[in-house]
Amino acid sequence: MNSTGANYSLRELILYFLKLGSLGFGGPVALAGYMHRDLVEKRGWISEADYKEGLALAQLAPGPLAAQLGIYIGYVHYRILGATLAGIAFVLPSFMIVVTLGFIYTKWQGIPFMQAVFYGVGAAVIGIIAMSAYKLTRKSIGTDKWLAGIYLTTAAYTVWKEDENILLFLGAGILYWWLKSPRKKMSLKQPSADLLKSFSFPILVNLSGITGGSTLWQLLLYFTKAGALVFGSGLAIVPFLYGGVVKEHAWLNEQQFMDAVAVAMITPGPVVITVAFIGFLIAGFAGACLAALGTFFPSYIFTVLPAPYFRKYGKHPGIKVFVDGVTAAAVGAISGAVVVLGKRSLVDVYTIVLAVITVIVLLRFKKLPESLIILAAAGIGLLVKCL
């Protein structure tokens, strides 16, 4: 045990997030599940309560869910340094991968095999995230009928609207607190006031009113706005990016944009890393760096500034109940996202069978690396589409 109270070193944490960023396929749903499995269940580095606090904060703040959860986990025992290094280690591997793919894409005018690979990988990913959602549901909901009701409501809303709404998460937390507080005589007065103050920092400037002459400056401002104002995990940012990158600025055409989304889906790490590929196509390596910085820096700020209050008041009975409600809503949204993504990826009998086989394999071989499943699925996709 070191001076921070952690049973692991900062170096071990950084190495873990480097590995997760290099081999963690499946988008935010799966990545959040991997963190719970590896850091809470297997290694015991992070407590269940700390994980729930991080998941709740990631859902309440704008930006990519998986990256924010990783940043919060880094903050738990190693504060600002841990949050910063965990975030960088998590994002860096996938950033390097998509920049390399961006170079190949511009050099050879497209990636023809991309859709064939994604055909198989997309199906396997659905199986992976379905298993992750199942484990999170079993762990977070339990037998509480109110939490189950919140879970089912947000899952149904996500499937219906194909979107996530922050008001649902806030409402779920407040509702569950209200249902539980009369029996326990709990109060949210002081902690809630401090928590609300933590979200009132002057980062929410009106970026839409700022203009810049150069493409790089415009690119940085645009992706900063995307990172600061878009709620929802993973692909939630895609419609926003489409409107600006293709329609408003005409930086990319339709096919280039869809290829960028496909690249993000078949690479490990956060799906939002598609911004680096887009930035590379627009302005080379500098564009990739600025797009990634603009997108991830706001989510870093939205995580580390409220984090002390979550750490300080997270164990308070009233806050704990509030977080339990938000967590139930978050897991419901994650489960609903499995259905939404499944409708896009499971397009025929081959993909359905591949997704089912993935679930069976993960149930049977619990220690099998997901990266092997992804590689096998990519090979199957190429065989089915090319033969």
Image (cartoon, helix red, strand yellow):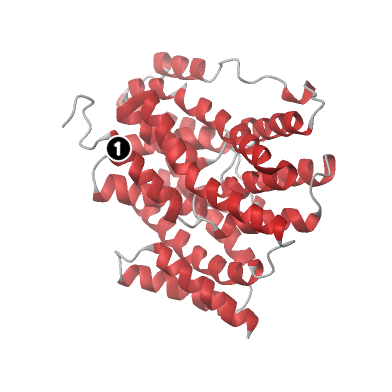
The quarter of the image holding the C terminus is bottom right
Query: 116 above or below 100?
Result: below
Disc tally is 1
Q: Residue at x 53, y 78 (%)?
A: 380
**Foreground pick, 301 / 375:** 375
> Which residue type does callout 1 highlight?
Arg
Question: Residue 64, how many percent across, how many down?
Answer: 55, 40
Q: Residue at x 47, y 59 (%)?
A: 129
Query: 23 above or below 120?
Result: above
Q: Residue at x 43, y 34 (%)?
A: 71
Question: Residue 376, how many percent across, how many down?
Answer: 46, 73
**Foreground pick, 153 / 202:** 202
Question: Residue 14, how many percent across, how many down?
Answer: 35, 39
**Foreground pick, 167 / 97:** 97
Left or right position of 187 against 201: left
> Which quarter of the figure has residue 214?
top right
